Image (cartoon, rainbow, N blue to C red):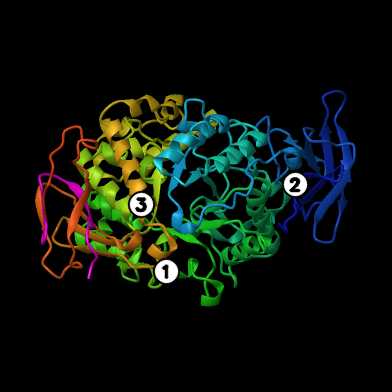
Amino acid sequence: MTWQPSLGAWCHSGMAHFRVWAPQVEQVELVLWRTTGKPNARLLAKDSGGYFYGSYADIASGDLYQYLLDGKGPFPDPASRFQPRGVHGPSQVVNSRTFTWEDGEWSGVELNRLVLYELHIGAFTPGGSFKATAERFRYLRDLGITGIELMPIADFDGQHNWGYDGVDLFSPAHCYGSPQELRELINQAHKTGLAVFLDVVYNHLGPAGAYLGQFSPFYFSKHHCSPWGPAVNLDGPQSQHVRAFLNENALYWLHEYRFDGLRLDATHALVDESHPPWLSELSLAVRSSLEGSSRHVHLIAEDSRNLAHLVKSKAEQGWGLDGVWSDDFHHQIRRCLVNDQEGFFRCYSGSAHDIAETVQKGWFFRGQRFEFWGRNRGTDPSGIPPFRFVFCIQNHDQIGNRPFGERLHHQIDLAAYRAASTLLLLAPQTPLLFMGQEWAAGSPFLFFTDHDAELGTKITEGRRREFSHFKAFQDPEPFSLIPDPQDPLTFLKSRLMWEETRREPHESVLRLYRRLLEIRSQEFVSREVVSVPSRMFSVNEYGLVLLRQGCVGKKFLMLIWLCGPGMISLPEGEVPDSIWESVMTTEDVLYAPDPLPPQIQPSPVVVSFQRPGAVILKSKAATK
């Protein structure tokens, strides 16, 4: 590892080191809050770049401190390692070197082997903590998950929040536990065989407790705006220091906590006209910090623009990220199964043809006009390996940004849900599950906050305004039923109910997910297999066929029917000649409490479905 901290407070060689950027401030005082006696203030030195610094032998891990800026404040450290009393309180010195890692030779998970599981620390377990989350890792490993993705944990105002209102980017949210408990979570994950990804938000700060602007007005752009207000300054005066702050944050999580990767939130909202752009600089900084290391560390962007250069290498004039969320797949599936038509969903047909094209290409919009934006969208992703695209059929955004937090399986029958799940888990892209999806959880995932009364009222009103243009809310009665984000019950209703996993129909869905992920792991993740292109095509309005190479020369044929009863008939020559045998169907009694098995004719392949479902066949003899 070649990275060392340069911002915040850190311990090294018996000293506590402090460094903070405040270029337009004349004097910064370090205020120490001892357990006894009066606060102690120490004047920091200033360098030519506007950084204030100092090192002290009598300050130790656990001590609390703040900064006075030309006598104003005191304010928490912008790079605080921990805020034990909340975002408005003092920062705490944390010595990361005292933690004993036990993950041995852990080097991470290769990108082609990733199965991601997105979870919210507060809502994943009844305990709602880092410690309680770690207690479920064996369950996730046995399910077939190889990487967990934590929704943002940067400290936020209040006791519960999605995390996208974070204001202390270096501080784990104090309501979830201590920095040591977060390290133990990652330590336990690695010992269990799980990679850990962190969702980081660099496009905006939350509305309460954000003190960056007190230290420098240059953190935010005077020329660009984002959906949340002034954009983060990535290309204006002094932006090199802002970029350095964000780079430091990313490297901090990857090295001090040993996260295996970062999910970069809404990179399309990073307004950046510089060359090279900051995302390219970030990728280079991460790679440079890992030089000589065997670790697999991945940067995955959430970006709605469908830009191929995000995940192309520097040699290909790309920005060097490892993966990108491809929301087109989710949108096509919902349009097909739920018939969502408002907002951006009107740009999708949901036809089997368009779903197949999305899987075959990686995303659907590759330069076509996107009516919701009023302009063309996307680029050609040809040549990008499928596993660099992250697919899902539900995630925190697509559930929680619905008025009532409905999950996909709350709006369709389980037969169709099993079919869509099969496609997600056996397609060549990297699948992402949202917590509870694997057992068709009964709990919704609602939008929740915990701000003070004045700000909370604005949040509640703004939330309801978001849905005012939807047809379903033109009448006042349903409009008034939208859950209040500020109501503590809104948060509590979003917690998973783990007892569901022991009763039907949830138990059957869980068995299905385990079996599908077992097939994926055993057959489709080796380097030799992923290098063989798969083939996805439609046969009619609702029928899909996926042909994939498995291990030791086997071929797999997945036939998926999405709506109502119907038949998939493959003419001779459509797939390689072979004797096909059934591996499983989603109507097997193990996976369907009320099975309606499809009729399967293996040669030529004809499958008659009584309702939505999936059939998995494999070649029995060598294919020609």
Identify the disc placed on residue 520: 3
Residue in view at x 57 percent, y 56 percent: 297
Q: Which residue is drawn at 88% across and 51% down?
A: 45
The answer for how far apart the CA atoms under marks 1 and 2 are is: 39 Å
Q: Position of residue 88 (x, y in %)?
A: 67, 34
Between disc 1 and disc 3, whose residue precedes?
1
Mark positioned earlier in the residue sequence (2 or 3): 2
Quarter containing the N terminus: bottom right
Q: In whole angstroms, how far apart are the C-alphas of marks 1 and 3?
A: 20 Å
The residue that disc 1 covers is: 384
The kind of residue tagged 1 is Ile
Image quadrant in which you'd find residue 413 = top left
Q: Which of 320 and 86 is in front in this view?
A: 320
Give the residue type that dot 2 points to: Gly
Quadrant containing the C terminus is bottom left
Q: Which structural element holds mark 2?
A: strand
**Left or right for 615, reference 15:** left
Q: Which residue is drawn at 56% across and 69% down?
A: 273
Q: Is residue 51 in view from this perspective?
A: yes
Q: Mark 2 points at which residue?
A: 8
- Count neighbours of disc 3 (C-alpha within 10 A) and say few if under 14, some if 14 to 19, many if 20 or more: some
Per the rendered image, the range of residues in magenta is: 602-624
10 Å crowding of disc 2: few (<14), some (14-19), many (20+): many
SS label for mark 1: loop
Q: As shown in the figure, which amino acid type bears the numbered disc 3?
A: Arg
Residue 619, x across and y down, in percent:
23, 59
Magenta includes 620?
A: yes
